[in-house]
Image (cartoon, rainbow, N blue to C red):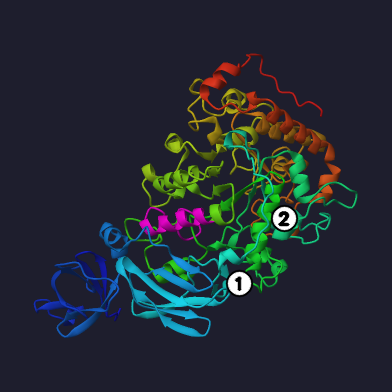
């Protein structure tokens, strides 16, 4: 309690917490002294025995040393909750500045936003250089010479302490995110497509969700570079018995887009020994750098960029779009994040009591509604669009991202001039954001180019997700049959229920994804007395309804061959034995795969399965009334 710090919590408010307050006379003249001038301060009130509030007559400058003097006792003035005020947003943010390390053969420009820092030092290879303070919290330094491939990081003096931090805009990293690396992206050579790509829009999309490592790590995959970006560039791979695997298999299935679980730099996997640990990728560290554990050589920081681009190009050669799963709602450990080190208290959301918001359930919520946090997200979306040529984004826990940010992402992607698929989880999460600002499905009309995972579709078919014994239409003998007209017409027609979204293309229909139990494992819990043959028919019915209903079908990799994760309902760190795509199962279930392939062909051949509007659906789909019967037919 013997702190000698005065926290600037609002434009005119200082808070001092100290056990020496009772020794001080608050009637004496008070002052905040700075390097350029002094500022008048008045004692306002006590809030308990050890907390005092002071009133500052004029706004204090941030980014310089300040001291509150009370009866010759000196308290360091540091920015506190002031960084979360409208005044701070108006005076210390800069949306137009290009941040990061911009490298050419002649020079590199280092630009960092750190408005509360009093000093910033650049450590560039074996050099130590001071950055120059500019307006609105920008620090900059142009360093002559060719620095491509060299390491760099920053040391900042923030709140009286020197902290080391990697640039959040870093484009390359050493193994295990040890330090940042300067990169001239023009020097990463990449083959280009001979022909122009022609990918379908969201209306005609069929999405197939895969994890880079899971897709090829199985010994039966026939892939040489297993579990890596490069593994998904190998074509014509087969199982030992000659059945197609990898990218060639995905192409043959007939889907239009692959959705990759996070491929940006994430925690919990040792990049130098990747097979010793496992992670889905929802523990983000650096958002503009590909994950190193998927690279063939993690000691060369440029290889992961090269190979990630080559993987995306390989999908494009097969006329498959690439949607990347992005996690802009939180970071792995807030306190260790460069965001928190560089501008403490700014990038993360707080509730009305100034406590860290935790609507994501992982300890922190990224404050997308703040100017520079939103700028980072928009800049990162732009980077993956332009540099990696991705074809869409799947937003993890999208309900915790504010609606204004999602609108701006939508506007950016529309400008791309090619179809960009945007989808996300529009759940109403308990984050410290007013409901009106959350990107939930009931706001779909405001963002017509963004789609939402339809949990009502999922739960109606297989039972309530978080009740393992609950049954739905396919596994409950026709339960919820009254919901089918609503589901198969895209969940948008008022005559069948309250619309889930505004347009049929905004409904992502699914019964299985990477999260929770696979459908097969779910059926083992809900229908344990059924024969395996019957469960397979039930499974087929669920996948068939997903593919042929209005809206956008979403298939989890391996769903078409009754994928199991051995009963593991949360396999995010469970390892390859549980998570790998079993290409042996692909051999055994080739008949069912052909059934799913045929349904996909039917959907793609007949536009009636891909109607664009409510009116079209009303004109083309007619529900026949009949006695409620439930039949599971052989295939």
**Left or right of residue 584: residue 392:** left
Does residue 350 appear anywhere in the picture?
A: no
**In the rendered image, which residue does mark 1 sit on?**
176
Q: Is-magenta flag for residue 199? A: no
- Residue 589 appears anywhere in the view: yes
Instruction: Calculate the distance from the C-alpha at mark 2 to the C-alpha at mark 1.
Output: 21 Å
- Give left or right: position of 400 versus 522: left
Q: Is residue 306 left or right of residue 98?
A: right
Label 2: state its secondary structure.
Answer: helix
Which of the 4 quarters of the picture holds residue 365?
A: bottom left
* Above or below, 209 relative to 213: above
In the image, what residue occupies the spot 31% across and 64% down? Answer: 83
Label 1, secondary structure: give it: helix
Q: Quadrant of the C terminus?
A: top right
Residue under the image location 28 percent in, 61 percent down: 88
- Residue 176 image offset from top left, x and y in percent: 61, 72
Residues rendered magenta in the picture: 359-383
Coordinates of residue 604 in the picture (x, y in percent): 69, 31
Q: Residues within 10 Å of mark 2 (few under 14, many from 20)?
A: many
Residue 362: in magenta span: yes
User: Which image quadrant for residue 36?
Assistant: bottom left
The residue beneath circle 2 is 214
Q: Position of residue 380 (x, y in %)?
A: 50, 57
Residue at 46%, 41% (x, y): give it: 440
Whether 527 is drawn above or below 44: the answer is: above
């Amino acid at each position: 309690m013997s702190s000698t710090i005065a926290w600037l919590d609002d434009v005119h408010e200082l808070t001092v917490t100290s056990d020496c307050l009772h020794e001080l006379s608050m009637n004496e003249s008070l002052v905040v002294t700075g390097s350029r001038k002094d500022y008048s301060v008045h004692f306002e009130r006590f809030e308990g025995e050890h907390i005092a509030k002071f009133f500052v007559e004029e706004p204090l400058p941030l980014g310089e040393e300040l001291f509150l003097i009370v009866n010759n006792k000196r308290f360091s003035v540091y920015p506190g909750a002031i960084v979360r005020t409208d005044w701070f947003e108006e005076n210390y943010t800069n949306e137009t500045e290009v941040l990061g390390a911009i490298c050419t053969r002649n020079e590199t420009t280092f630009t960092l936003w750190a408005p509360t820092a009093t000093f910033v030092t650049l450590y560039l290879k074996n050099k130590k250089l001071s950055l120059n303070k500019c307006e609105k919290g920008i620090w900059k330094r142009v360093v002559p010479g060719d620095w491509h491939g060299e390491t760099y990081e920053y040391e900042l003096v923030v709140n009286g302490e020197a902290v080391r931090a990697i640039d959040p805009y870093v484009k390359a990293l050493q193994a295990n995110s040890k330090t940042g690396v300067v990169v001239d992206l023009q020097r990463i050579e990449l083959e280009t497509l001979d022909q122009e790509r022609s990918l379908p829009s969201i209306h005609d999309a069929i999405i197939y969700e895969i994890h880079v490592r899971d897709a090829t790590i199985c010994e039966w995959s026939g892939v040489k570079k297993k579990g890596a970006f490069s593994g998904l560039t190998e074509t014509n791979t087969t199982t030992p018995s000659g059945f197609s695997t990898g990218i060639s298999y995905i192409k043959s299935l007939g889907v239009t887009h692959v959705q990759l679980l996070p491929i940006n730099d994430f925690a919990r996997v040792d990049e130098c020994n990747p097979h010793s640990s496992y992670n889905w990728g929802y523990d983000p560290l650096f958002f503009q750098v590909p994950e190193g554990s998927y690279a063939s050589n993690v000691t060369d920081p440029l290889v992961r960029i090269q190979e990630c681009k080559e993987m995306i190009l390989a999908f494009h050669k097969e006329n498959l779009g690439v949607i990347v799963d992005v996690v802009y709602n939180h970071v792995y450990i807030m306190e260790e994040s460069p965001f928190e080190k560089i501008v403490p208290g700014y990038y993360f959301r707080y509730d009305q009591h100034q406590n860290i918001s935790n609507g994501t359930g992982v300890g922190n919520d990224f404050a997308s509604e703040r100017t520079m946090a939103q700028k980072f997200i928009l800049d990162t979306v732009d980077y993956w669009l332009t540099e990696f040529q991705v074809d869409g984004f799947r937003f993890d826990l999208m309900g915790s991202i504010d609606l204004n940010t999602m609108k701006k992402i939508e506007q950016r992607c529309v400008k791309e001039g090619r179809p960009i698929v945007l989808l996300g989880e529009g759940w109403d999460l308990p984050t410290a954001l007013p409901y009106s600002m959350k990107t939930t499905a009931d706001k779909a009309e405001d963002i017509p180019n963004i789609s939402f995972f339809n949990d009502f579709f999922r739960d109606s078919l297989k039972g309530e997700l978080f009740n393992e014994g609950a049954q739905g239409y396919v596994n409950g003998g026709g339960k919820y049959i009254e919901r089918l007209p609503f589901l198969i017409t895209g969940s948008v027609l008022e005559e069948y229920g309250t619309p889930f979204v505004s347009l049929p293309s905004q409904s992502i229909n699914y019964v299985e994804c990477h999260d929770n139990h696979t459908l097969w494992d779910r059926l083992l819990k809900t229908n344990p007395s059924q024969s395996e043959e019957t469960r397979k028919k039930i499974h087929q019915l669920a996948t068939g309804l997903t593919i042929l209903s209005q809206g956008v079908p979403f298939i989890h990799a391996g769903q078409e061959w009754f994928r199991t994760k051995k009963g593991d309902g949360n396999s995010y760190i469970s390892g390859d034995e549980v998570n790998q795509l079993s290409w042996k199962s692909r051999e055994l279930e080739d008949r069912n795969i052909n059934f799913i392939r045929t349904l996909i062909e039917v959907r793609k051949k007949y536009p009636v399965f891909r109607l664009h509007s409510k009116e079209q659906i009303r004109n083309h789909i007619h529900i026949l009334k009949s006695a409620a019967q439930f039949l599971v037919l052989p295939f």
